[in-house]
Image: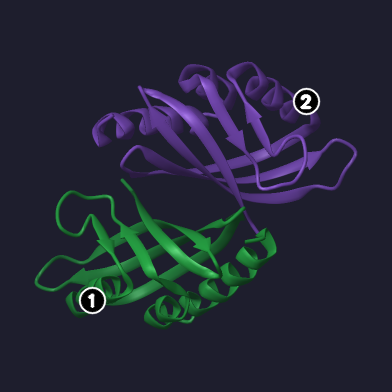
Chain colours: A green, B purple
């Protein structure tokens, strides 16, 4: 996997995110074996496989009202890239909050094989 | 290495960077075996060991005039954290430019064992 191919994938993936098409971005670029790693303890910390990662996304979108999202990136190094998401959201039944999150994506064979999320404090 | 220890190190490291004390931040928190990975080809792509990484930093500071730096973060997940650097710099003999860079740091045994830099395009 060359850097330029990772750059192309990163550009296309991030362009979809900038249009708000997060689920389409994942569906188009996740590998079947994609692993999603959150900065938390518990069941959602590590989710493996496209079906499980899609279900995690569906749960998230069903349980959060998104008021606005700012997407910055991509930032590329080798077969990895970084995208920053600054989100204004209200969790269902919860308080509106600002999320500031970095996603680090690993690319192999033209697909995203891992996404790993980092949160600002 | 627990997440809270990584969070503490990430906070302290980033606080030094926010004060402009980049070299002090490295000197205090790099492991002797630290590896620094840039998004480029060639000799500087992968630099290993504290002495070599310090020399790389010294070279960079000697060859760039820094007009301003904005430091955002840290963003933590497990034993890794992310810091964003937005820099207004002039390379020696070159044109003033805006750098937009993510550093991803890996922590083991209370020290930074790897730093990996990602650039926005």
Which residue is tagged 2? B62
Residue B36 x %, y %: 60, 33
Which residue is tagged 1? A55
Query: In this view of the protein, can residue A107 be seen by the observer?
Result: yes
In this picture, residue A50 sits left or right of residue B103: left
Q: Residue B68's quadrant in the figure?
A: top right
* Secondary element type, mark 2: helix
Residue B7 x %, y %: 31, 35
Q: Which label number is shown at residue A27?
A: none
Image quarter of the N terminus of chain B:
top left
Image quarter of the C terminus of chain B:
bottom right
Residue B54 x %, y %: 64, 20
In this picture, residue B12 sits left or right of residue A42: right
Q: Residue A73's quadrant in the figure?
A: bottom right
State the CA–CA distance, disc 2 to disc 1. Answer: 51 Å
Taking the spot 40% from the left edge, 63% from the top edge, the residue there is A86
In this picture, residue A66 sits left or right of residue A83: left
Q: Check the image and report above or below for A16 versus A108.
A: below
Question: Dot 1, crowdedness within 10 Å: few (<14), some or many (≥20)?
Answer: few
* Secondary element type, mark 1: helix
């Amino acid at each position: 996997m060359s850097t330029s191919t990772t750059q192309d994938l990163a550009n296309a993936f991030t362009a979809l995110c900038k249009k708000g098409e997060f689920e389409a971005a994942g569906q188009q670029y996740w590998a079947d074996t994609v692993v999603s790693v959150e900065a938390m303890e518990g069941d959602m910390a590590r989710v493996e496989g496209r079906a499980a990662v899609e279900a995690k996304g569906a749960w998230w979108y069903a349980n959060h009202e998104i008021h606005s999202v700012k997407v910055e990136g991509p930032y590329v190094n080798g077969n990895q890239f970084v995208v920053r998401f600054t989100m204004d959201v209200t969790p269902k039944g919860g308080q509106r909050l600002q999320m500031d999150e970095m996603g680090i994506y690993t690319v192999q064979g033209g697909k995203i094989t891992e996404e790993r999320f980092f949160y600002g404090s």
